[in-house]
Amino acid sequence: MSRGARRNNNNNHNNSNNRRPQQRRPAPIDVWSNPGALPEIEPIAVAPEVGAVLRSLGDPPMVNGSVAAKYFTDVVERAAAIAAALALSADVSADSAGD
């Protein structure tokens, strides 16, 4: 007898006790419903030292880790500058809130 024939002799997959339990579908969501009022916008404050958390971790454990850390800090500072510019242009910056 071949191995394939032995494998096919197992009829457990036809046994009703081995069936998976029926999963209930979640109730449909009405995507066009009114979501309600939005919360008040809080002014966005720019951190004075955006690379501090990254520098507190130390240099990355790799060859020329200090050079890589400088590049990572530059990227974080650039991202913070862009975020601050976007906040200022949308008039939600904490610096422009008093104006």
Image (cartoon, rainbow, N blue to C red):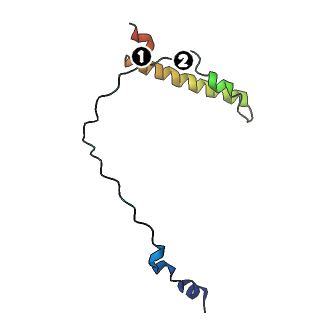
> x and y percent of residue 41 in the render?
37, 21
Relative to 27, 60 lies left or right: right
Circle on res. 88: 1
Q: Amino acid at mark 1?
A: Leu
Cα gap from disc 1 to disc 2, whole angstroms: 14 Å
Q: Which residue is mark 2?
A: 47
> x and y percent of residue 98 in the render?
40, 8
**Residue 70 visible (yes or no):** no
Can you name the residue that lies furthest to the top here? Answer: 99
**Residue 3 visible (yes or no):** yes
Which residue is more in the foreground, 33 or 22? 22
Q: Amino acid at mark 2?
A: Ala
Tag 2's secondary structure? loop
Q: Residue at x 35, y 26 (%)?
A: 39
The label nearer to you, 1 versus 2, is 2
- Callout 1: 10 Å neighbours few (<14), some, many (20+)? some
